[in-house]
Image (tube, rainbow, N blue to C red):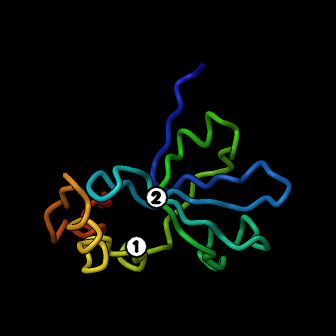
C-alpha cells in the first residue's frame, strides 16, 4: 500500500451514502495523541467549507490516515482552516467526576493537570 500523507487543512469527503465533509484542523500529540477533525453539516458544500461559511456539526479526535486507508473518506482538496482550535472544547476528563472514578479503581493513575492548551500545538 502507498504511503498516506495528511496535513492540517486537508478536506475529506466521507464515502458512505450520507456524504459529509471533514477537515483536519490540528494535530494533538498531548491530549489524545490524535488528529483533531471537524465534521460539517450534511448539507455543506465544498465551496462553503473552503470559504469558512459551512456549519460545523461536531468535532472529534481521530486518525485521518486510518480513515483514508480504510476507505472511510477520501481527500478532496486542501484548504485554509477557518476553525480556531481554541473554540473546540473537549470534555475535561481530569475533572472531579472522573477523579472519583479513578480513586475507586485499582492502579489507575491520572495524568498531570493542567495540560498544554490545544492552540499551542497548531503550527503557525
Q: Is residue 89 above or below residue 121?
A: below
Q: Position of residue 104 (x, y in %)?
A: 24, 66
Place of residue 22 in the rendered image (x, y in percent of width and height, measured from the top left): 62, 59
Above or below, comparing residue 24 to residue 113 in the picture: above
Q: Residues within 10 Å of mark 2 (few under 14, many from 20)?
A: some
Dot 2: what SS? strand
Horizontally, residue 108 falls left or right of residue 57, namely: left
Q: Badge 1, how many Cα within 10 Å: few under 14, some, many 20+? A: few
Query: Looking at the rendering, which quadrant does residue 108 occupy?
Result: bottom left
Label total for image: 2
Quadrant containing the C terminus is bottom left
Q: In the rendered image of this protein, does residue 108 appear above or below residue 102?
A: above
Question: Measured from the top left, where is residue 11 in percent x and y?
Answer: 61, 55
Q: Earlier in the sequence, mark 1 or mark 2?
A: 2
Q: Which residue is rendered at x = 18% and y = 56% of the image?
A: 109
Does residue 25 appear left or right of residue 44 in this picture?
left
Q: Image point 40% across, 73% down: which residue? A: 90
Work out whether residue 63 or residue 11 is closer to the camera in this orientation and state it.
Answer: 63
Q: Tell which residue pokes out farthest to the right in this image.
A: 17
Give the spatial CA distance, label 1 vs label 2.
9 Å
Q: Which residue is mark 2?
A: 61
User: Which residue is label 1 attached to?
Assistant: 90
Point 68% across, 61% down: residue: 21
Taking depth in this image into account, of 82 and 62 the one nearest to the observer is 62
The quarter of the picture where the N terminus appears is top right
Q: Are marks 1 and 2 in contact (CB under 8 Å)?
A: yes
Amino acid at each position: 500500500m502507498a504511503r498516506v500523507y495528511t496535513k492540517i487543512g486537508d478536506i475529506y469527503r466521507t464515502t458512505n451514502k450520507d456524504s459529509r465533509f471533514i477537515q483536519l484542523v490540528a494535530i494533538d500529540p498531548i491530549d489524545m495523541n490524535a488528529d483533531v477533525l471537524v465534521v460539517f453539516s450534511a448539507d455543506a458544500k465544498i465551496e462553503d467549507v473552503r470559504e469558512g461559511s459551512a456549519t460545523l456539526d461536531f468535532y472529534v479526535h481521530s486518525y485521518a490516515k486510518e480513515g483514508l486507508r480504510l476507505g472511510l473518506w477520501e481527500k478532496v482538496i486542501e484548504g485554509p482552516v477557518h476553525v480556531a482550535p481554541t473554540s473546540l472544547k473537549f470534555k475535561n476528563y481530569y475533572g472531579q467526576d472522573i477523579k472519583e472514578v479513578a480513586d475507586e479503581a485499582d492502579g489507575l493513575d491520572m495524568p498531570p493537570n493542567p495540560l498544554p492548551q490545544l492552540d499551542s500545538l497548531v503550527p503557525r
